[in-house]
Amino acid sequence: MSIILSLETSCDESAAALVSNEKGKIELLANEIASQIEEHSRWGGVVPEIASRRHLENLPFLIEQVFLKSKLQLKDIDAVAATVTPGLAGSLLVGSITARTIANLHQIPFLGVHHLEGHLSSIYLGENYPSPPFLVLLVSGGHTELIRVDAEHKFQRLGRSHDDAAGEAFDKVARLLGLSYPGGPAIQKVAKSGNPKRFLFPKGRVSKPEGGFYPYDFSFSGLKTAVFRQIDKLKSENRTFPLEDIAASFENIVAEVLVERSLRCAHDQGINSLVLVGGVAANERLRKMMLEKASENSINVSLAPMEFCTDNAAMIGVAALSRLSSKNYQSSMELGVSARWPLEKSDLLYEFDPPF
Ligand code: KG4
Ligand code: ZN
């Protein structure tokens, strides 16, 4: 049996977990998160400097908690993992240096994990997950990607957003609507009583230079502008402000775009399994629409468990366990952190000569 201590500090959640793998059976032994959302919401978004400071304060406490709750000790763990890319560099550094220090002191392996590989791995914390090949729709605050998985750790990006990520669109539109950060849960809450068909917002498309559109790519910045214009128009007409209807119409168009392009991609690729992960995957309208439309198209859908959609350390632990148990992957103690790094090149995080 392998047990991993995993840390996640790439954005505004400080998190630690203990995850074990016994003959392929993943078990979550302890999982702790200290959210900084309340503090950042005062500024309407994440303030990087505050985030790094809070990670530094939270992490020792969270690590202590996972050991207390699991009744394990540092000597019981086989490796330490931390997110090393992508994310806020200062925040990533806190988790990465903490993990490397523990690994060094206890002479155990260190694994630097790609945050998106972590999100992909959240699916294994649930009951229902497919075997490759499958397609992943990864929708978070920083990414909107369609990724084909052909084998363990073999990723191919087939679609992406050319501007805002889906979660970022939720956050920005929430701000336009005077709702709190993070925008996703705030919009979902008011959208429940709104009419999703009242406003027809655009389904942003990305043009190819040679004509036509990229079929699996996304653009959300035009949608944000359309919502802004609609709000402006309603305000200038001095009409009662239909907050719920705008929120519902926006949420509905985002869900429609994500579902339609994912299913088209799966269909064109001849893939009949689709996985939904990332913070925006917690959206109830999106989950429901994806299940319904996929079943009409005979495509199986696996949804990341709700509690593991947004950032957490359990998913980072699962990704690290899979690396450790497949080819005994380990990272160099010299591996640093990087604000950006393509998922397709995540194998390089386990090279003797690290890429950053
Ligand atoms: O995966 P995540 O926790 O962090 C990143 O890696 O970015 O995703 C955070 C994003 C935020 O933009 C937040 O507004 C969005 O996920 N989000 C949601 C919901 N819950 C979180 N978006 C729509 N509906 C939700 N229920
Ligand atoms: Zn994330």
Image (tube, rainbow, N blue to C red):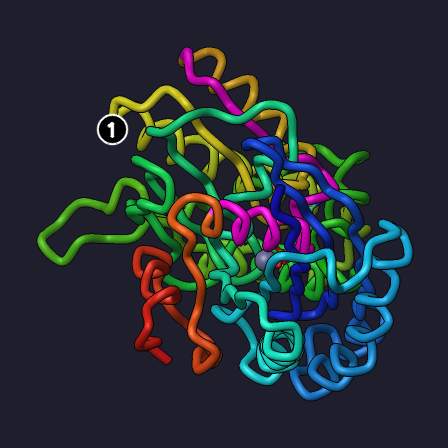
Residue at 41% x, 23% y is 273
Question: Which residue was labeled with disc 1?
Answer: 269
Nearer to us in this view, 54 or 241: 54
Question: Left or right: 3 with respect to 254?
Answer: right
Residue at 69% x, 83% y is 52
- Residue 148 belongs to magenta span: no
Residue at 32% x, 65% y is 348
Give how far across and how far down residue 35 sits, in percent: 80, 64
Magenta-colored span: 298-322
Give how far across and how far down residue 307 sits, in percent: 74, 42
Residue at 66% x, 50% y is 3
Residue 246 makes an appearance in the image: no
Give how far across and how far down residue 99 sits, in percent: 63, 73
Label 1: how many residues lie within 10 Å, few (<14), some (14-19) or many (20+)?
few
Question: Left or right: 82 with respect to 329?
Answer: right
- In which quadrant of the rendered image does the C terminus lie? bottom left
For badge 1, the amino acid type reads Gln
Disc 1: residue Cβ within 8 A of ligand 1's nearest atom: no
Hey, which quadrant is residue 250 in on the image? top right
- In which quadrant of the rendered image does the N terminus lie? top right
- Residue 310 belongs to magenta span: yes
Quarter of the rendered structure image containing ligand 2 = bottom right
Residue 300 makes an appearance in the image: yes
Give how far across and how far down residue 239 sits, in percent: 77, 53
Hey, which quadrant is residue 191 in on the image? top right
